[in-house]
Each structure stands twice: as structure tokens, then as C-alpha cells.
Image (cartoon, helix red, strand yellow):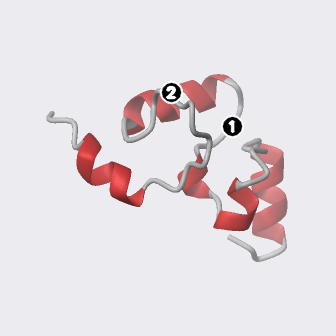
Amino acid sequence: MECKKEAILVKCNCTYEPCSRKGICCDCIAYHLRSRELPACCFPAEAEQTFNRSFEYFARLVNDRRV
């Protein structure tokens, strides 16, 4: 399968600038799942900027109907 990094970078909402995985979804997802986290694209902008990518934080956002 061909990586579509350039097309994905246009949509990527990750604000962590030194991230080497930006636009490479398979690497990003694998990295975050190892830490019991979800990638930035699962969060609304204001929540993503907290850099809290935990499953627990995501569940709170779902319960609060923010996702």
C-alpha cells in the first residue's frame, strides 16, 4: 500500500511540532496505542492542544458529548 503522507499532512491536526510521525498514520497509531493513547486526529482542536491523548481523557470527552 502506498503512503499518502503529503495528502494526510493537509488534514493532520497534530500540534506537536517535533513529531516525526506526522502524516504517517500507521506509525502514529502504533506509537500511541503502545502508550494507551489515541492520536491527535481523534480529538477536537481544543482537546488536542492539551496533549492529553489518553483513553481516559477521550472517554470523558465522549461522556461530555465533545467528541
Residue found 73% across the figure and 66% down from its top:
46
Corner quadrant of residue 39 = top right
Identify residue type, mark 2.
Ala
Q: Position of residue 61 (x, y in %)?
A: 79, 65
In the foreground, 30 or 23:
23
Give the SS element for disc 1: loop
Identify residue type, mark 1.
Glu
Give the SS element for disc 2: helix
Residue found 83% across the figure and 47% down from its top:
56
Corner quadrant of residue 53 = top right
Residue 37: give its label.
1
Vertical placement of residue 56 versus 25, above or below: below
Residue found 61% across the figure and 31% down from its top:
32
Which tag, 2 or 1, sits closer to the chain's start? Answer: 2
Residue 8 is left or right of residue 15, and the answer is left
Corner quadrant of residue 52 = top right
In the foreground, 67 or 44:
44
Residue 30: give its label.
2
Distance between the alpha carbons at the discs numbered 2 and 1: 10 Å
